Image: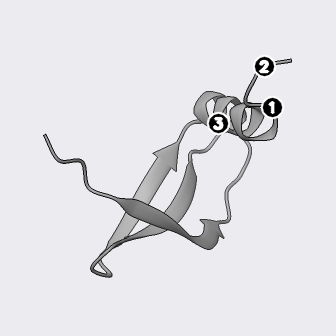
Amino acid sequence: MNPITIRWDRTILPTTPGADTIVCCLTDDGRPVALILSDEHRVGLGLQLLDPDGE
């Protein structure tokens, strides 16, 4: 299996509390991709990015 590689294009679409967060990304060949995160997943991702060891 070859996963599609995407990179964050530094854009996050505005959201309201309780709504999904849309993180704009691009594939290696320039196709747009939207990473959709629920509030729970957004917080979880943020925590792992800030503290990868969970300390």
Name the front one of labels 1 and 3.
1
Q: Residue at x 32, y 81 (%)?
A: 30
Dot placed on the residue nearer the N-terminal end, 2 or 3? 3
The x and y percentages for residue 4 are 26, 55
Residue at the far right: name it. Answer: 55
Q: Position of residue 19 (x, y in %)?
A: 61, 44
Residue 45, label in figure: 3
In the rendered structure, the answer to whether residue 50 lies left or right of residue 44 reads right
Amino acid type, residue under disc 3 in the picture: Leu
Residue type at numbered disc 1: Asp
Front position in the image: 4 or 53:
53
Q: Which residue is at 72% across, 40% downward?
A: 49
Q: Quadrant of the C terminus?
A: top right
Check disc 2 and report its element: helix, strand or loop. Answer: loop
Q: Are marks 1 and 2 in contact (CB under 8 Å)?
A: yes
The residue labelled by disc 2 is 54
Indicate which disc residue 51 carries. 1
The three-letter amino acid code for the residue at tag 2 is Gly
Labelled disc at residue 34: none
Q: Give me the C-alpha separation between circle 1 and circle 2.
A: 5 Å
Q: Nearer the viewer, residue 38 or 54?
A: 54
Residue 1 in which image quadrant:
top left
Residue 13, compared with residue 50, is above or below; it is below
The relative height of residue 38 versus residue 13 in the rendered view (above or below) is above
| Direction left: furthest residue | 1
Residue 50 lies in what quarter of the image? top right
Q: Nearer the viewer, mark 2 or mark 3?
A: 2
Q: Relative to 34, is 44 on the left or the right?
A: right
